[in-house]
Image (cartoon, rainbow, N blue to C red):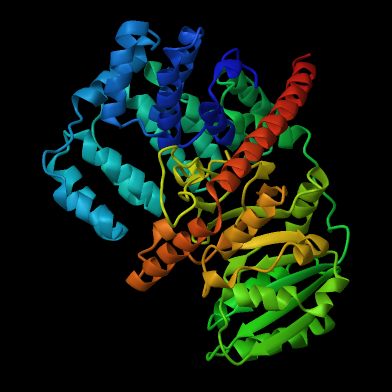
Amino acid sequence: MSGKFWGFLDTASRYRLLVSGHGKPHLMETANRIINSAESSREKSSLIDLGVDLFLAAWESSPLDGQLASNLLAINKQLSFLPQPLVETMSLIATNSAIPENLGYLQRLLAKDDKEKLLDYLSKQTEREPENLFWLSHLLDLAFFLGRHEVASAALARDWPTSMNMVLNKYAGDIAFCSADYEQAEAVYSDTSDGALILGENLLRLAESVDRMGRRDEALILWRDRMTARPWQVNTWFKVYDCLLGGEGANLLNGQVAICLYSFNKADDFDATMKSLADSPLDNVHVFALDNGSSDHTPEVMTRWKDQLGERFTHIGLPVNVGAPAARNWLKNMNELKLYDYVAYLDDDASVPSDWQAHFSAAVESYPDAGVWGCKVVNEDQQEVIQHADLHLRETPAEFEDALRGFEFAYLDPYNQDLDYGQFDYCRPCVSVTGCFHLFRQETLSHSGDFDLRYSPTQYDDLDHDLMLATAGKTAVYQGKLKVQHKRKSGSAIILSRAARGGGAGNVLKLESKYEAREISDIIARDIERLETDFTEKALKVGNVMKEFDS
């Protein structure tokens, strides 16, 4: 990594920076680790500067956070690192933000995860206490997550002093960006009228807006400046590498591909999935569709697709629902699959882009020895909400002891902490990818062991399979340029039934009981080594190309 602090970071801090330079909670946790480690380091000053910059980036992602603004102002009294316009803005926010004394009802709504009721409550509290930006900050965060831009716009429509323009530009630009109005986003993000500064996060979103309008040279200048200003923000380096040096991939994978789907009582969803698949080149593709004992019109839909695709479609009907792991294994162990070079599993409620093979082809070409290749999954009705990107395990606390569990399952999830502004559009190794759409070499899949039936009827069987590959030394590879839309919202975006929550918790316990702490530590250690090697090689190449670009 470019940056003199890199060699002095402890392993845990380095790991977190390698995972992502985005996500407010992720940045705050990493900043705290770095600053706490600075006391015992000979590079105390450099590490403190780095930690403070991470805090600043965290604030930029949610600039109405009064507590974070107060903390930065306190640090600024000692270090004097903030420009005066930013001090004025943060002071206004900090002065007008107060944590309410009674948060009981808010906490109960958060526990229930009823987001619409929560949105209504926050809207009313913002109207009742407009002078307290605590409510507005939380309202805006939730409104953007739900795609309720009209709520955000209405809440921001008040008289503001000019010192708030840089914050207003952040939110107005985000609304335009998420509405795919990149011309308007560019105008707002780049606004410096009345002395407004452009926040670092806004500069990255400005670059993305410009790039999406086909002006890559301008975007590269902005990205280069951000890599100079924040060399620790690894996402920018990865993105620029893929823009400049990442292979586009052949239109088709080099070999025959078996697409495996299994479905239970989701006939219309399955039909939509097949329509998206049929809109892509299928010259080298055969679809194997397993009807998991459906009682709706799934059999008729599958028959219709058999008529349409002919020999490229195989319909397997089961009398009962055997669950996801068994369905995966049924398909995996069919003799017919041995005729194919690649096997991909696709969820029955997902929509793939027409160029999915080209993206997988690029990932396979870049990382030919991977155990599995995966994609980025987003909500179908709000594509800026990421359900899954590249998964990296969180270390189990050293004091963890449990007679039943071998480790404590947790992962670093910066992709769930912000909306998608292109910061996860890269291809690189990870520990696990989503089972919504993932690709295996047939030989690897056949020798990797079956999906574990203990996770029936569903949930975590795909993650467990990736961990099985990881214990054998194989890596997963995430292809962020392949964006798959998923009808079923992620668990954080829906209200799960008690039975579903219980089943998920039970499967987590099974996962934690299956692996020893030593195995998980080894997986994380290999992940850190791969991330560091991958980033170092790419950063060096990007640096060399950018020198040529400057000349």
Residue 156, quarter of picture: top left
Residue name at image x 65 percent, y 18 percent:
2
User: With respect to residue 175, does 240 lie above or below?
Assistant: above
Residue 322 in percent (x, y) is at 57, 82
| Nearer-the-camera pick, 149 or 138 | 138
Q: Does residue 87 appear left or right of residue 512 in this picture?
A: left
Quarter of the rendering occupied by the C terminus: top right
Q: Can residue 280 be seen in this view?
A: no
Residue 469, quarter of picture: bottom right
Q: Is residue 6 visible?
A: yes
Residue 506 in percent (x, y) is at 43, 66
Residue 529, quarter of picture: top right
| Nearer-the-camera pick, 319 or 280 | 319
Q: Does residue 89 appear left or right of residue 376 in this picture?
A: left
Residue ranking furthest to the front: 403
Residue name at image x 76 percent, y 83 percent:
314
Residue name at image x 57 percent, y 41 percent:
521
User: With respect to residue 39, does 541 lie above or below?
Assistant: below
| Nearer-the-camera pick, 42 or 548 | 42
Disc tally is: 0
User: With respect to residue 96, does 42 lie above or below?
Assistant: above
Residue 379 in percent (x, y) is at 51, 58
Q: Does residue 339 appear left or right of residue 72 in this picture?
A: right
User: With respect to residue 299, does 398 lie above or below?
Assistant: above
Quarter of the rendering occupied by the N terminus: top right
